[in-house]
Image (cartoon, rainbow, N blue to C red):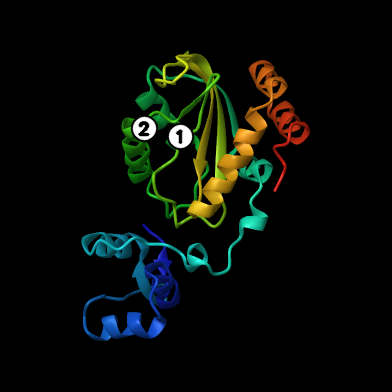
C-alpha cells in the first residue's frame, strides 16, 4: 500500500500551487480518497496520473526552494541502509533481487517496482565505478523516502557488472534517495571516499560492520 499524500504534498510534487491542485480535484481531474480518517491521494496513483500526462514528480526543494543538502551525509546514509557480508548471487540480476529483499525500506515502498527500476537502470548502462565497486540506483528518486539510504553489500564471490575497467565487483553500494540533489551529493561523497587507494584496500579486508564504519569515518565518508 503506497503512502497517502495530503493535497499540499501532492501539489508540491506536481509543482503547482495548492489552489490549482484543488481546482483539478473540483473539476474531477484528480480523485481524492479517504484512508484512516485522512483525505488525500495514494502516491502510486499520483505517480500514474502524472506519468500519463508526462509530468515529472519533483519536490519543490528541487526547484530552487528549501533543500536538505546540508543534512546529507554518507556515513549516516550507510548506517540507515545497513551492511551485509557474504551476499551470494549468480548474476547482477540475482544480486539486485537479493539486495531489494535486504535493504531496510518503509512499508509504502513497492519493492517489486523498485527492483524493476534498478534493473532498467542497470540495463541502460553499468553502474560499476571501477576498482571492484558498483553503485546501483534507480533513474529517478524515491519520493517515499524521508532520508537517503545507502546499503552496503560485500559479495561472497565477485560479479561481472560490465565495468569499464573490466574488474569484477566485490563491494556494492545500493543508493536510494528522496531527491536528485541528495543523490548527487551522496554520489560525490562516495566518489571522494573511493578515490583513496588506502580506503579501497581497507574495504577489501573489511570483515565487520564496525570496521566498515570506522573506515568511512577515517577516510572522508563522514563529510557533508
Observer able to see residue 53:
yes
Q: Earlier in the sequence, mark 2 or mark 1?
A: 2
Q: Residues within 10 Å of mark 1 (few under 14, many from 20)?
A: many
Residue sitting at x 57%, y 32%: 152
Q: Is residue 114 above or below residue 60?
A: above
Residue sitting at x 48%, y 52%: 180
Q: Position of residue 83 (x, y in %)?
A: 61, 32
Q: Which mark is residue 136?
A: 1
Separation (CA) of disc 2 from disc 1: 7 Å
Q: Secondary structure at mark 2?
A: helix
Left or right: 104 as drawn, with respect to 41: right
Q: Are marks 2 and 1 in contact (CB under 8 Å)?
A: yes
> Which picture quadrant has residue 218?
top right
Residue sitting at x 68%, y 17%: 201
Observer able to see residue 38:
no
Q: Which mark is residue 168?
A: none
Residue sitting at x 60%, y 34%: 191
Q: Which residue is mark 2?
A: 122
150 and 105: which is toward the camera: 150
Q: Position of residue 47 (x, y in %)?
A: 31, 60
Number of numbered markers: 2
Quarter of the N terminus within the rendering: bottom left
Amino acid at each position: 500500500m503506497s503512502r497517502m499524500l495530503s493535497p499540499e504534498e501532492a501539489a508540491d510534487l506536481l509543482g503547482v500551487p495548492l489552489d490549482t491542485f484543488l481546482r483539478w480535484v473540483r473539476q474531477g481531474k484528480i480523485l481524492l480518497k479517504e484512508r484512516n480518517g485522512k483525505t488525500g491521494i495514494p502516491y502510486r496513483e499520483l505517480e500514474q496520473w502524472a506519468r500519463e500526462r508526462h509530468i515529472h514528480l519533483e519536490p519543490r526543494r528541487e526547484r530552487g526552494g528549501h533543500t536538505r543538502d546540508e543534512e546529507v551525509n554518507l556515513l549516516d546514509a550507510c548506517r540507515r541502509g545497513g551492511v551485509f557480508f557474504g551476499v551470494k548471487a549468480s548474476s547482477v540480476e540475482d544480486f539486485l533481487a537479493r539486495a531489494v529483499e535486504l535493504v531496510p525500506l518503509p512499508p509504502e515502498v513497492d519493492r517489486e517496482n523498485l527492483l524493476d527500476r534498478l534493473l532498467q537502470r542497470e540495463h541502460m548502462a553499468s553502474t560499476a565505478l571501477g576498482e571492484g565497486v558498483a553503485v546501483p540506483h534507480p533513474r529517478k528518486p524515491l519520493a517515499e523516502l524521508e532520508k537517503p539510504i545507502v546499503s552496503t553489500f560485500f559479495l561472497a564471490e565477485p560479479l561481472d557488472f560490465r565495468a569499464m575497467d573490466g574488474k569484477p565487483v566485490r563491494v556494492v553500494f545500493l543508493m536510494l534517495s528522496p531527491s536528485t540533489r541528495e543523490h548527487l551529493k551522496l554520489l560525490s561523497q562516495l566518489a571522494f571516499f573511493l578515490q583513496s587507494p588506502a580506503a579501497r584496500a581497507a574495504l577489501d579486508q573489511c570483515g565487520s560492520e564496525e570496521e566498515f564504519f570506522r573506515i568511512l569515518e577515517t577516510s572522508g565518508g563522514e563529510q557533508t
